[in-house]
Image: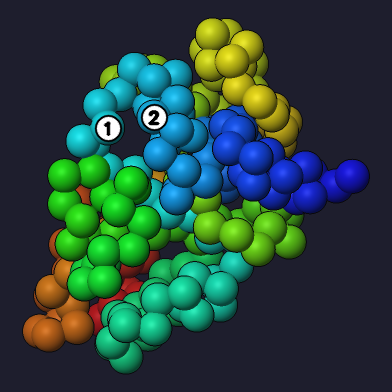
Amino acid sequence: MTDAATFERCMSTGGVAVFPADTVYGLACDPSSADAVRRLNSLKGRRLSKPSAVMFFDRDLALDALPELGPRTRAAFERLLPGGVTLLVPNPRHRWTLACGADPGTLGLRVPVVDKLRKVRRPVLQSSANHAGEPDARRLADVPEPIRAQADLLIDGGELPGTASTVVDLRAYESDGVYEVMREGAVSRQSVEAALS
């Protein structure tokens, strides 16, 4: 069974996986399973009220799943993803509220470049594979041992760049073209500005 098939099976049965993104190692689970989301946050020592990202491994699948995104936001999505960026977009239909923390009107979205998982067809709730507030993991061995021991699946992707994704707020982009780089990470602020100018 391929990594993608094993990963999808883990998600479909309510499991939690440690996997390589294109930035740092992450934890993933089914975004519609309250039990799985609670377990993921418990592994991290993280409050459920803190938002996570919903990750797709194919940009077109992400766009198809969010038909309510306006044309300007969709164009920005296509210019910035796939890659090491998390986009904050309006979530008027309150999709995947378990990933939204205290604000169901905002959705964080990621589409990484991960060859091992590019055939995964389902969205996942994703967070970094570390204890809350601790350094990000660039190797599987850097993921805290208690997390590795309690996860249902471990996928080794070798050594990763080790810098978390850049977070870009596009919530006002559709109406007035305004965006904000909330956290500069794997993609430089200048690259974001060039893509959105």
Relative height, residue 171 to residue 68 (above, below): above
What residue is pinned by disc 1?
48
- In the rendered view of the protein, which quadrant contains the N terminus? top right
* Element on which disc 2 rests: helix
> Which quadrant, please, contains the C terminus?
bottom left
Q: Which mark is residue 38?
A: 2
Q: Nearer the viewer, residue 193 or 86?
A: 86
* Residue situated in front as seen by the camera: 86 or 103: 103
Please tell me whether residue 109 is drawn above or below residue 193 in the rendered image. Answer: above
Can residue 180 be seen here? yes
2 or 1: tag closer to the N-terminus: 2
The residue type indicated by label 1 comes to Leu
Mark 2 → mark 1, Cα distance in angstroms: 7 Å
- Callout 2 crowding tier (Cα within 10 Å): few <14, some 14–19, many ≥20: some
Picture coordinates of residue 39, whole percent (x, y):
45, 26
In the structure shown, which secondary structural element does the residue marked by tag 1 occupy? loop
Amino acid type, callout 2:
Arg
Give coordinates of residue 24: x percent, y percent.
52, 36
Q: Is residue 95 left or right of residue 140?
A: left
Residues tagged 2 and 1 counted as in contact (Cβ below 8 A): yes
Mark number displayed over residue 89: none
